[in-house]
Structures are given as C-alpha cells and as structure tokens.
Image: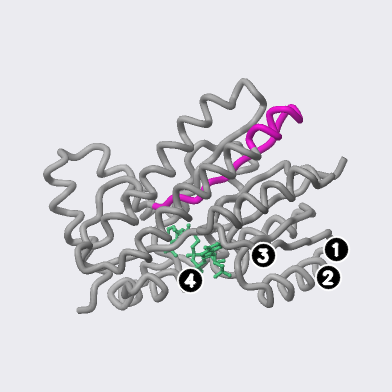
Amino acid sequence: MQRYALVTGASCGIGLALAEALARRGQPLILLARRKDKLESIAAELAQRFDVEVLYRVCDLAEPLHLTGLLHELEQSERAIGLLVNCAGIGSGGDFLAADWPRVQEQLELNILALTRLCHALGQHMAIQGGGQILNVASTAAFQPIPYMSSYAATKAYVLHFSEGLREELKKRGVSVSVLCPGPTRTAFFKNAGLHTGRMEQGKLLMSAEEVALAAVRGLERRQAVIVPGWRNRLGSLLPRLLPRALVRAAAVRIGKLFQPA
Ligand SMILES: NC(=O)c1ccc[n+]([C@@H]2O[C@H](COP(=O)([O-])OP(=O)(O)OC[C@H]3O[C@@H](n4cnc5c(N)ncnc54)[C@H](OP(=O)(O)O)[C@@H]3O)[C@@H](O)[C@H]2O)c1
C-alpha cells in the first residue's frame, strides 16, 4: 500500500523545501498549512514536476478544534501516513514582557501542543502498521536559552528533548524519530516573528531552505537522531553542551541581540 508523508508548514520556507526534496525522491505527499492558494499551486506544481501524488489539507494547527477535525479526517481516511514531518512553527522576539500575549500563546500551541498531538495520534497509527518515521523541526535555538527570544528558544528545547525521548520509546515499535535543528535560514520566519537578520546577512550566516532540506532528507535516510545542517551550526550546537552554564547564558545574550535592530 502507498504510504504518504504528511508535511506541516509546507506552504513556504523549510517545509516547502522539504516537500520538494521528498517529492523528488518519489514520495507521495499530503501538504498542510493555512494558506489554501499556496498549497493548491504547490501541490499541482510538485505533482507535475515529479510525477507523484500530492494532496493538501488546510488547517490552523494553533486552533485545537481544527486539529481535532484534521485528526478525525486522517483516522477515517484510507490513506496511511508513513512519514510525519512536523515543520510548521512560528517565533516571537524582543522583550518578553512587552510581547503580544496572543502571539506567544499561538507559538506555544503550534510549536509544542500541535506537534506533540500529531506525534501522539500518528505515532499510534505507525506503531500499529508496524513502522514509520517522524521528523520534528526544532532549531539550534534548542541547545541554549536565548534572551529576547526566550519563549521561542524554550519551545525548540522542548521539541529537541521530546523527540529524543520519543525516539528511544518508539524504537522497539518500528518507528524512527529524528529531529532537525537548523540554524538561521533565509525564510519569512524572522520577519513574521518581528526579528531582524541584517547582521546575519552581513556575515553570510544564513543557509538556504533547500540546503537545510537536503541535509534533512539525507539524515532521514540514515535514520539519524539529531540532524544539524551546516558545520557552523554543528559547532554552535556543541559548545553550549561543553561550556559552563553561566558562560553559555552570557554568550546567549549576544546571540539574542544579533536579531534585534542595530
Ligand atoms: N528560518 C529559520 O531561521 C529557522 C531556524 C531554525 C528552525 N526553524 C523552524 O523551521 C520551521 C519552519 O520555519 P520557516 O523558517 O520555514 O518559516 P516560514 O517560512 O515562516 O514557514 C512557516 C510555515 O508554518 C506554517 N504555519 C504557521 N502557522 C501555522 C498554523 N497556525 N497552522 C498551520 N501552519 C502554520 C506556515 O504556513 P501558513 O502561513 O500558510 O499557515 C508556513 O508554511 C519552524 O518550526 C521554525 O521554528 C526556522
């Protein structure tokens, strides 16, 4: 039976690049995001270019009732999901106390709750089917606290730890869990989060979504536990695990300020 990859956040950025990299490998897809027009044209384009079946579902994952509806639909469907890619995510930056609360709540709903619920529901199906793969998108922000992006970085620390724990739990059920930790990547993410990338652009420190997606699919093929694209990001993710915590926090203030207006 043909098994689909469900890719959330597939209407742009890293999710779109992941969908394209998977379609290129002949993987049938179900794309998910909120913008129907984007999904519709991406699905048609990928299906035509790579001769694979590409379906799409519109869903606001930050709305628990929408997610309940989606899970019900997937349960009723005859289409089996063999790969879940939890890529949809948003950020928020700046002074936490001045943050717009609905944005922070939306971030927690999407980055943590929706991702966890999809792993719970689809992980069960995969275990019953005798196997599957899950790719959760965290960030290099997961490896240390980041002042002025405190709540976002903490959501990604959750994704990293949750995914690694789940990997060990699901191993014996035939489900392989990987977590992708991209560093700063050229997408709409920063603008939408009210963050600035000027200083990163000057230092040519941004990767492209395509480079990130290529590293991700290679990591998926090798069933790698933690996938960190790019040597700079791999080095950056190692240091916080070796250095004293006080030093990590002090350095993290500088990282947080990189994304604030000069
Ligand atoms: N860009 C970076 O530097 C970077 C670095 C590390 C990790 N990441 C992570 O990578 C993931 C993708 O980010 P990106 O950089 O590709 O950003 P992006 O270009 O802004 O893409 C975000 C995606 O999430 C979808 N989305 C947002 N809110 C949603 C909601 N409520 N329900 C369903 N879908 C929703 C968006 O689609 P719609 O607007 O159509 O819903 C879009 O497809 C995120 O988890 C982010 O935290 C990004």
Residue annotated with mark 1: 51
**Amino acid type, mark 4:** Thr
Marks 4 and 3, how far apart in space?
21 Å
Q: Residue at x 66, y 53 (%)?
A: 69
Quarter of the view holding residue 120: top right
Quarter of the view holding residue 107: bottom left
Q: Residue at x 73, y 73 (%)?
A: 40
User: In the image, which residues are magenta?
Assistant: 123-139
Marks 4 and 1, how far apart in space?
27 Å
The answer to whether mark 2 is within 8 Å of ligand 1 is no
Place of residue 91 in the rendered image (x, y in percent of width and height, measured from the top left): 38, 63
Q: Secondary structure at mark 1?
A: loop
**Amino acid type, mark 2:** Gln
Residue annotated with mark 4: 187
Q: Nearer the viewer, residue 142 or 92?
A: 92
The answer to whether mark 3 is within 8 Å of ligand 1 is no
Q: Earlier in the sequence, mark 2 or mark 4?
A: 2
Q: Secondary structure at mark 4?
A: loop
Marks 2 and 3, how far apart in space?
21 Å
**Amino acid type, mark 1:** Asp
Residue annotated with mark 2: 48
Q: Are marks 3 and 1 in contact (CB under 8 Å)?
A: no
Question: With respect to residue 27, does 46 lie above or below?
Answer: below
Neighbours of disc 1 within 10 Å: few (<14), some (14-19), many (20+): some
Q: Earlier in the sequence, mark 4 or mark 1?
A: 1
Q: Are marks 2 and 4 in contact (CB under 8 Å)?
A: no
Neighbours of disc 4 within 10 Å: few (<14), some (14-19), many (20+): some
Quadrant containing the N terminus is: top right
Answer with left or right where residue 70 lies relative to residue 253: right
Marks 3 and 1, how far apart in space?
22 Å
